[in-house]
Each structure stands twice: as structure tokens, then as C-alpha cells.
Amino acid sequence: MKYDFDEIIDRTGTNAMNTDGFRQYIFNATEDMKFPFKDEEFIRMWIADMEFATPPEIREAVKERLDRKIMGYSQVFDPAYYEAVSNWMNRYYDWSFPKEYLETSHGIIPALYELVEYICKPNEKVLIVTPSYGYFKSAAEHNHLELVCSDLINEQGHYSIDFADFEAKASDEQVTLCIFCNPHNPSGRVWSTEELQRVGEICLNHNVWVISDEIHCDLLRTGKKHTPLAKLFPDTDRIITCMSPSKTFNMAGLMFSNVIIANEGLRTIWQKRHYGFKNPLSIAATQAAYEHGDEWLKQLKTYLDDNFAVVDQYVKRYLPQAVFHIPDATYLAWIDITAYIPSNVNLPLFFAEQAGVLLEDGHMFVANGGGCIRLNLACPRSVLEEGLRRISTLLVNKDEGVPVQV
Ligand SMILES: Cc1ncc(COP(=O)(O)O)c(C/N=C2\CONC2=O)c1O
């Protein structure tokens, strides 16, 4: 079957954050915030969900569950769920874990909030690398814990871990947890096994638990390989792995993720305190993703490879002073446009008001991201090309103050 990633899908009236939540999320504004563009005229490249139809195999599984006519209280009882997850991990990552390690959550963000609470004591600290997905900071703040940031080294857009700084911070006895993003949002880095080995050794040597957030792990460029951090440390139970098909298969709204907890004590706390009932449609969708998602994912990855090639060529031709590299993973393009725009410009507001493009910028990624914009490329190529046209036209003509005509 050939899937249609060029299809333009109307998401209005679906309670989508993407279309209706941007004023509050990006601008901390109310619904009456005005722009020179109608909402439907925006090119939306901000929040990380896709403009592609959730795979038909998943939608069919949800319909079949609906046809069972009753949607009562549910949990994951069917052993087929673990089989589906385990088979996927074996096939894609040559990794397995005992069934009893597998817990589920109403999304990875809620899991982070809970795990930080269950792992850390008051006055302890949480270590992350920056720039970072903003909710890593929120998970620490939600638990009234200090966040410790280790800035990634940025060499012309190539990001690497400053291991001396990372270890210095991990050696602080108050640092008891590291939330590590593998692959990394927003840079798109897939950490090498050598880098992962060093992160794990530093954390474990300094008695720091690790939550390895691997939600982007299926979304690899062709030829790239993901290694689960826990796979490299089979003898420890202090690495928690968070994964979910929600990012891979565009079903984040179903709020369902996997949390693999090897430590028995922590798992017992989780089982006692985590609200265990689940949406039966989410269980059906997630199991179907792992059972039937292979071909769709294969075609998606090819389409995204081509979208990234379009961005690469476009930036080289129209924005030659920007710094961009096709990332190893994610569907997110992280572009340093410092050469085109002063650092004091509010980039999301600038592009929303002047170009009708909704995007996120480095200030939304905790620290160490200034001058960068992040573009969601999980959209039909026609939409991507229009977004790139508007962005480059504005950056090239900004001194004339000429807003882009949509
Ligand atoms: C590293 C990472 N962890 C967790 C999540 C969310 O997991 P959920 O609670 O949906 O299971 C995201 C989504 N990242 C987004 C969502 O919008 N913009 C982003 O960068 C993410 O990038």
C-alpha cells in the first residue's frame, strides 16, 4: 500500500493544539491575540505532531475496539500487548526486557513528572543537557527541585556533550537524577554508543538515576541506528526507559506511552501511586502500531528524508549564512539564523506576525539555544515549501520591513 503524505488534512474543529493552542503555548496569550493573518493562513511548524493521517492500520484497530460497543474501565491485561512491544524492540533495537518491567503511562510528560517525584527527595537536583525539551525543566519545577543544566557544545551546528562539565555536575551529591533525551530534541542528535556509554558510566558512578527519554527513537534518517541506553547497561536497574509510538505514528492525542522500570522498588512505588486505568482505544492503537506499523513507518522515513533534503537545499541556496545540518533523528529542523537577525528579536512573534509561520525558537528549549528556530517538517511537501518561502523571503527582505504576502 502506498500512503499519501501529500494529503492536506483539515484539523480545524478537532481541538488540536496545533491549530487552536498556539496563542497560549507559544505566546502565553489569550484567544483574542490578533495577527495580520487569519488562523487558517498560518503555516504551522511548531508543536511536534504531524500533519499526516495517523496510519489506517491504527485507525482500523480503534474502530474495531469501538465496535465492541462498551468502553469501560480498562488496563493492559492482554499479554499480546507486551508481545507487540517486545517484538518491536527486538526487531528494531535488538533489545528486550522482562514483561514485569513494562509499565504504561498517560504520556511521557506525565511519566516524567511522576518519576521525578518517586526518585528524588526534596532539595535534590535534576540534571539535563541543554538545549532541552522544555518539559524536562517543567518536571523538575513541578516537583520543586533545582534544575542543573549542562550546555551541549555547539560547533557550527554539530552538538556534542561537554563530558567534563556533565561529570562535574553529576558529581554534585545533590544531583540524583538525569533526564536524558536519546535521540535529542531539538538537535536531532542520535548519540553514539561511545557517548551513551560515557553518559551512563558517569551517572551510575555518581549514583545518579537516568530517565532515558527515547520517544523519537523510531524517527531516524535512513541509515541511522538507535541504541537504547539501557541496552548498554544490562546489569543496572537505575536506568528507566520511556518510549512511545505516539510520536512515531502521530497519535500523541491518545496519551499512551511505555515506561520500562527495571528497579523493583521503584516499580512498586509506581504501581502503588500511578493511576493505572487506561483508555481502551489508546491501548488498541498502541498495540496496532507495534504490530502493523512497519510499512507506514518505512514510507514515512523516506518522505521525511526528502523533506529534509528540500530544507537542506533551500537553506544552502536562499539562506547561505544559516547553520543547518540534517539531523540523525526526529522530524525537526534546528536552524541557527543568528546571521540574519538580532538576538533580541522575539523569533516566534516575528515569524508569526511578518510571515504567517508558527515556529518555536531556542528560548523555548531551556537554555543554550539562542538564535535558533525549530521547524516541524512532518507536513506535506507543498506546506513545507510555502513555509520555507515565507521564512527566507522575510529574512532576506526584513530590512525593508516588507511583510510576506501569503
Ligand atoms: C523528548 C520528548 N519527550 C516527551 C515528549 C512528549 O511525550 P508525550 O507526553 O506526548 O508522551 C516530547 C514531545 N515533544 C514535543 C511536543 O511538541 N513539541 C515538542 O517538542 C518530546 O520531544
Image (cartoon, helix red, strand yellow):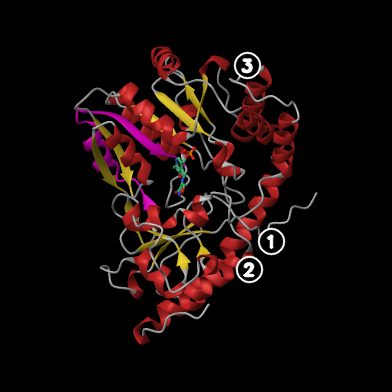
Q: Which mark is residue 6?
A: 1
Front-most of 93 and 218? 218
The reply to whether the C-beta atoms of the residues labelled 3 and 2 are less than 8 Å apart is no
Q: Which mark is residue 382?
A: 2
Residue 304 within the magenta-colored segment of the rendering: no
Front-most of 208 and 67? 67
- Looking at the picture, which amino acid does disc 3 mark? Phe
Q: Residues within 10 Å of mark 2 (few under 14, many from 20)?
A: few
Q: Residues within 10 Å of mark 1 (few under 14, many from 20)?
A: some
Residue 123 is left or right of residue 11, and the answer is left
Q: Residue furthest bottom?
A: 400
Residue 120 is left or right of residue 379, and the answer is left
- Looking at the picture, which amino acid does disc 1 mark? Asp
Residue 114 is left or right of residue 166, and the answer is right
Residue 13 pos. (x, y %): 58, 53
Q: Look at mark 3 in the image and give the residue it sits on.
A: 77
**Which callout, 3 or 2, points at the residue further toward the start of the chain?**
3
Cβ of mark 1 under 8 A from ligand 1: no
The reply to whether the C-beta atoms of the residues labelled 1 and 2 are less than 8 Å apart is yes
Residue 296 pos. (x, y %): 70, 46
**Residues shaded magenta:** 159-182
- Does residue 327 appear anywhere in the picture? no
- The residue tagged with tag 2: helix, strand or loop? helix
Residue 10 pos. (x, y %): 63, 58
**Which callout, 3 or 1, points at the residue further toward the start of the chain?**
1
- The residue tagged with tag 1: helix, strand or loop? loop
**Which callout, 1 or 2, points at the residue further toward the start of the chain?**
1
